[in-house]
Amino acid sequence: MSDAVLATVARKPFKRPGAGLLKGTLIYAALSVAAFVSIFPFFWMLVGATNSAADIVKGKATVGSYLFINIAGLFQQVDIVRVLFNSVFIAASSTVMTLLFASLAGYAFEMFRSTARERVFTALLLMLSIPFAALMVPLFMMMANLGQINTYPAVILPLVSQIIIFSTFYFRQATKSFPHELRDAAKIDGLKEWQIFLRVYFPVMRSTYAAATIIIFMLSWNNYLWPLIVLQTNDMKTLVLTISSLASAYTPDYGVVMVATILTTLPTLIIFFILQRLFVQGMLGSVK
Amino acid sequence: MTQTRIGRNERINGWAFIMPALVIVGLFMIWPILWSLWMSFQTGRGMNMSFGGFDNIKRLAADPIFLTALTNTLTFLAIQVPVMIMLALIFAVLLNSPYLIGRGFFRTAIFLPCVTSLVAYSILFKSMFATDGLVNQAIMTLGLEPVAWLGHPIPAKTVIILAITWRWTGYNMIFYLAALQNIDKSIYEAARIDGVPAWAQFFRITIPLLKPVILFTTIISTIGTLQLFDEVQNITLGGPSNATLTLSQYIYNLTFRFMPSFGYAATVSYVIVILVAILSYIQFFVARERR
């Protein structure tokens, strides 16, 4: 459709300024506006980190001179090293746990087929649509009864349960492309099943693991609602919780907030630009 | 003989490999959702609860805040999801053209919002839509009246819808782009030779062929919007006067902001469970009917 239009535009860019050229211009205009709107908030964030709170709420969108004052302000207002540690530790632990358990399950669902396991798999897929809103109250009471409020396990385990189902599904889908001959050969060599998993499956499926790592890490890093409920003191808060509470002050110090927001966004942004293909592959695969 | 030994091995390993995942799902998903069902029939404050039968459901029907939250959530859903799906489709179709200059740039740019955390972008939007903020400055440059974006119900709802659309359009777009790449180009070739205009190609070829993906993304977006929390919590805090309060936020408020009434909160949460179930079912049903 647009192919036809753009093809004409590309072939005869200036010779016949008719309907084709007009449409082509409209297409580029629409895409440029979309690109601008998409990128602008990132620019706003970067520029905001160099401005004072007063300038930010007045809409100043040029580079200012407050960067170091804002950075200093962040160190003053929060124990940023501790907060960073919390974020990294919680996201990394949930990612490692999810990757391990989901790939084991995905491998087993695909390699060892049985009617009973197919039923379990279907039941798992149905559970994908259970909204977290319905779990937060009982989960909170569970953690309160166990005396685990404000601890790492209390935040990590439910996080894992939220992402493990689609991760399992993702690994099962990916395992379909794992050559069975490799497993058979390893069996003949006398390897046990867990050895096959560790020494054959894992290295062969590297790129699947990489794509899954990116998505799972991002989901855990960015999670908000459950940590908000279960982490209650400042020394346990993650970066996301910290920027949320900094920005919800009556008059937020937006300069400081922007610096913290950059810290929150930077890891996923860097991963995205370095590993764009894997990133998109993981996103498509994780829900396909 | 060998066959049975392998069979037994597979049986044991099959369950052993799945077990850790099942235990986690069982403890932190199945158990809580069942407990929540039980709790929804309990009344009382804090940890003192007693069986209340259908009291919570009666309270639900007469609770104006619940009705506001439900209406708001459905309003966001009804406006935001179709707008976003349409935009994502259009961008995908435009970006699918091999003749487009700067495809990679446009694709990356439109996809970029997906890498931000929901809280981070919410804060960015909140600061841009401040009373004397950037958006109002831009509006005034154009000679228009500034808007108290976060101070009035309809502008506040608009900001929330704009924000969610900004964050998720690119995400939906990559699904359509992936699906478009699987469509046989010769179909369009044939249509072009038959003189089918571009818009008719879009509605008669592209949309029908993409129907499974469109359905899938609609379900995902619907379920996501029904659970909307991060954005409203960080941009408007449900205000002004509950104009952007969502169901998830109401459950959160009932449990963690006011004197907790766990039983009633569980009842409200089952409203979301039921809505998600019904909508997923309808959407699947409609797709199967028309196929």
Image (cartoon, coloured by chain):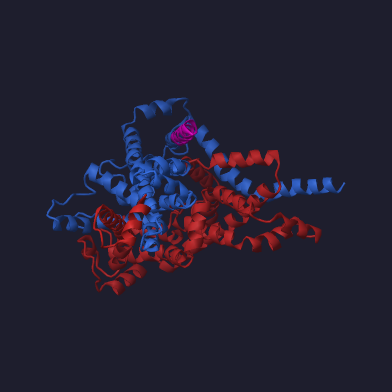
In the rendered view, does A224 fall on the left or right side of A114?
Answer: left
Q: Main secondary structure of the magenta part?
A: helix
Segment tinted magenta in the rendering: B273-291
Is any atom of residue B259 visible in this view?
no
Q: Quadrant of residue A37?
A: bottom left
Q: Quadrant of residue B249?
A: top left
Q: Is residue B288 magenta?
A: yes
Chain colored red:
A
Q: Quadrant of residue A184?
A: bottom right
Which of the pair A241/A27 is nearer the observer?
A27
Q: Position of residue A128 (x, y in %)?
A: 53, 43
Q: Position of residue A100 (x, y in %)?
A: 62, 57
In the rendered view, does A43 fall on the left or right side of B42?
Answer: left
At x 26%, y 46%, the residue is: B156
Q: Colour of chain B?
A: blue
Is any atom of residue A157 visible in this view?
yes
Q: Is residue A77 magenta?
A: no
Taking the view exactly as shown, the residue that stands out farthest to the left is B143
Q: Position of residue B238 (x, y in %)?
A: 31, 44
